[in-house]
Image (spheres, rainbow, N blue to C red):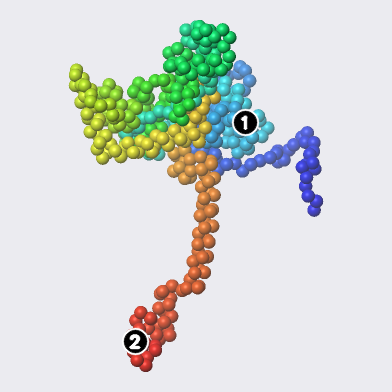
Amino acid sequence: MAMGTREGRRRQEGFWLTHDELATAPGHPFYQRLNQLLDEEKFDQFAEGECAQFYAEKNGRPSLSPGMYFRSLLIGYFEGIDSERGIAWRLADSLALRQFLQIGLDERTPDHSTISRTRRLIDLETHRKVFGWVLGLLADRGLLKGKMVGIDATTLEANAAMRSIVRRDNGQRYEAFLTELAKKSGIATPTREDLARLDRKRKKKGSNQEWESATDPDARITKMKDGSTHMAHKAEHAVDMETGAVIAVTLQAADQGDTTTIHETVAEAGEAVATLIEREVAKAPEAKPQVSVNGIKEIVADKGYHSGPSVMLLGQAEVRTYISEPNRGRRHWVGKAEEQQAVYANRRRVQGRHGKRLLKRRGELIERSFAHCYETGGMRRTHLRGRENILKRQLIHVCAFNLSLIFRQLVGAGTPRELKNQSRDTFAAFIWLQIALLLLRDAEKRDPPRQHRLSSARERGCRPWHHRRKIEGCTTGS
């Protein structure tokens, strides 16, 4: 048989193809189960009902249906794709994802402009309703309690460059501003080296009160966790401390302090839990509630969220706080008796056994949600501009993370990649088990077990060596 070559594979495609000649794929088991779950819970009917106001009956070309749009954004998390352009390319490349979106082989997959236009068309409130719908799935399966909530935030790099910042007062670019400073200092024709030297000597040169991005005004100048300075946004999560589910997601200005943004996130989480309580009562009034009927009762956070007014306000809302307290030295409480009482009560709770256990669990569950959503999920750097646009994508991205909690119960894996690794690890464990059994069998042949040696000695009429006595003239020990 002659070897096939790449040159020999070149041929003219046929003009007509029958249906049975089209390329097919068996489909991915993870996405098949995901579609099965969404179909059983009637997700498409829910999404189409909520999005009906944004679609016309007859005008324009056929649009991207709500079910396909939201599934496309879910793919961003499950495949670790950061941009809508990357999602569109992956859809066009994968037969399994075609089946997930129920796109026929004779149909074109949506391009990135269609996905982007649909996102701009559907408002933020509808994306929040989809997020709440997924929370309902978690509550039905006992994966959301809503009693103990942890709060933390991380930075997302914005789609804006530091070199594109302009002054807020007159719109002057940064390089032109430095050139003007250099001329005032006596340098008539400053070079780039002169400008860089002048810039290094300036203090507080990255003030958000003076500068903003020309391309994304919502972005803020922020120092990232690796020490570099970028334009960024601040993502804040409210996480169920019993299950790890993300109850609420907010996107804040990156220059806002944690003690300022915590109140909005706690309010979002409280509304989400209250909605779930109402849903459970309407759905099954006599059944045992899965969600805490008293709402959020405990808030856990790190020391960045600690301040006297914040702890006092949360205490007034009948919420017990477990917020680590930074070392601020001796405090002066003149005229702040209520604030003092709230801070001391928080300190006692943090030092207790329950508080220490919650703070330890906070680092485990909240950091895990950040790692899955923004590191392996591929959204650490945003490719959208405008806080509302980013929050729309972020809400559905975190929806996929919450769905992964359900799939860890169903199939033992939260993403297609994890399911593949699990199958590979299971196969490897099976091979190693077979090897261990073979080695054990060979070892038994060479050196039989002790019980086998004892029974063999009894069959020969001899006592085992440890029962034998030294008797003169007797070599058998009998």
Image coordinates of residue 28 in percent, x first then y, are 57, 41
Q: Residue at x 51, y 65 (%)?
A: 439
Real-space CA distance between mark 2 and mark 1, rounded to the nearest whole angstrom: 86 Å
Element under label 1? Answer: helix
The answer, for residue 88, to whether it is visible in the render is yes
Image position of 36 (left or right of 474) = right
Q: Which image quarter: residue 117?
A: top right
The answer, for residue 399, to whether it is visible in the render is no
Amino acid carrying mark 1 in the image: Trp
Image coordinates of residue 395 in percent, x first then y, are 46, 27
Q: Is residue 35 above or below residue 421?
A: above
- Residue under numbered circle 2: 470
Q: Residue at x 19, y 19 (%)?
A: 334
- Residue under numbered circle 1: 89
Nearest the viewer among 258 and 327 is: 327
Image coordinates of residue 26 in percent, x first then y, are 61, 43
